[in-house]
Amino acid sequence: MTTVSVDGLRVSYGKRVVFDDLDLELGVGVHGLLGPNGAGKTTLMRVLATVLRPDRGEVRLLGHHIGNPPALRQARRQLGYLPQAFGFYPRFTVREFVEYFAWLKEMPPARIPLAVDRAIERVGLLERADDRMKHLSGGMLRRAGIAQAIVNDPRLLLLDEPTAGLDPEQRVQFRALLRELGLDAVVLVSTHLVEDIVAACTRVNLLDGGRLVFTGLPDELIAAGGDGDSGDSPIERGYTAVLRGARTAPR
Amino acid sequence: MTGRPITLHLSSRGAPTFLAGVGVITLLAWAAGTWLASRPYFDGPAARIPVVALAPLLAALLLGPTLAGADEDLERSTPLPWRAWRAGHLLVAALVTAMALSLAGLRDSHTFGAHALVRNTLGCIGLVAGGAVLLGARLAWLPAFVYVSAVYAAAPRQTGATVAAWAWPIQPSTTSASWLTAVTIFAVGAAGYVHGGSRALAVRRFRSRGAP
């Protein structure tokens, strides 16, 4: 079932066109979003998070057309978003931060205390829940950011480089959390760490220069690579092979 | 709605610091106004011009950082009716500041007293709100600071309608043109802020359009 649909998307920054006529469809599951720097991953995330209005094109999130204000508000209630680098509130404790976003997402007040504790527990920060955010390490801040993104049990979860700053053990735990979340939600994860894709994603989308140059299963991306392609792992070889093919193919 | 979300929201905006700052500015304005008016080398109500010009400016500068949260993208992705919240935030801040500062000038409310403090509060807050729209919350103070400082330094002594229109921060409160300008600046700044929030339009021209 398609729950995120992007049709004919155009986004530009002044004269620089990031996307021109991009189409994308996502269903329930964990979708990896790969691509080199400047490919448009963060821009796509911001469009889907409804913080960047496209020049043109139709975006439907969870059945809601985001050009329609009441529908936009409905979609935002079911949305979780972690930006690539998020500004945090230094005076807030982790619990206050997650609670604040639960309120901003218009969760029923009676559900908030339990949902906050559950979200903080899921990212492994329960012991630091009452610490002020200014006292947290980079990895802990990232996990607090993930906690606010999942506090409302979103049906659409957008995570822009969520594993940046996490240590290997935390990344393993995070992948397990991703798989769990992807059972009944659309999860889109932008990352440069291709091993996260293999371990946690059901599908992969590869952007290059604002074009969607690959969409398929992780195994299909792996199969695209050969021994002659550069990379230290099968998926890295598949990644570089697809990019090379996309860049040499006529547009 | 309980008070807890409001408390968190105010805390996220640094409202306690702003309120404490306005309290301190009010006390200083009261003390400075009284002291200046009693100096033998000043003549009458004009002694309070520095207070009337600078106290609202300082309060408005403190308001700037409260006009945005720590992460605009993260907050804009949530369904809260942000335009209504921004309107409430600005109006309550203007009301609190104007009420507090007017206390400092109540003893002689006319000419350069409470009325002028209220007018300048509106004008300065309008400039800061407009600054937040154009430059973002962190630099929102800049247009108000530059403009009021320039007017104060220029110090025109005439009270004609044209001068009153551009030099409103240091005009007697009895000149209606100064009120017209200050209220217009407040209305335009507030409308821009309520509509678009704190964002750097000058920068975003090269990026893209944001959502409400």
Image: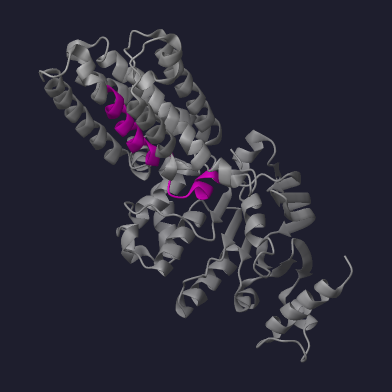
Quarter holding the N terminus of chain B?
A: top left
Q: Position of residue A202 (x, y in %)?
A: 68, 70
Q: Which residues are magenta?
A: B52-77
Q: Hey, which residue is sitting farthest bottom in the picture? A: A227
Tell which of A57 and B17 is nearer to you: B17
Residue at screen point 35% across, 22% down: B169
Residue at screen point 49% across, 29% down: B84
Quarter holding the C terminus of chain B?
A: top right
Give the vertical position of B132 relative to A203 (above or below).
above
Tell which of A31 and B98 is nearer to you: B98
Question: Magenta part mainly helix, strand or loop?
Answer: helix
Q: Position of residue A129 (x, y in %)?
A: 33, 60
Q: Is residue A213 left or right of residue B19?
A: right
Give the vertical position of A149 relative to A196 (above or below).
above
Q: Is residue A165 left or right of residue A113?
A: right
Residue at screen point 20% across, 19% down: B47
Any magenta on residue B211? Answer: no
- Total number of numbered labels? 0
For residue B118, which quarter of the picture?
top left
Q: Is residue B78 left or right of residue B167?
A: right
Residue at screen point 43% across, 49% down: B70
Give the vertical position of B13 relative to B1 (above or below).
below
Kindly tell me whether residue B169 is visible in this rendering.
Answer: yes
Q: Position of residue A149 (x, y in %)?
A: 51, 55
Kindly tell me whether residue A1 is visible in this rendering.
Answer: no
Tell which of A189 and A209 is nearer to you: A209
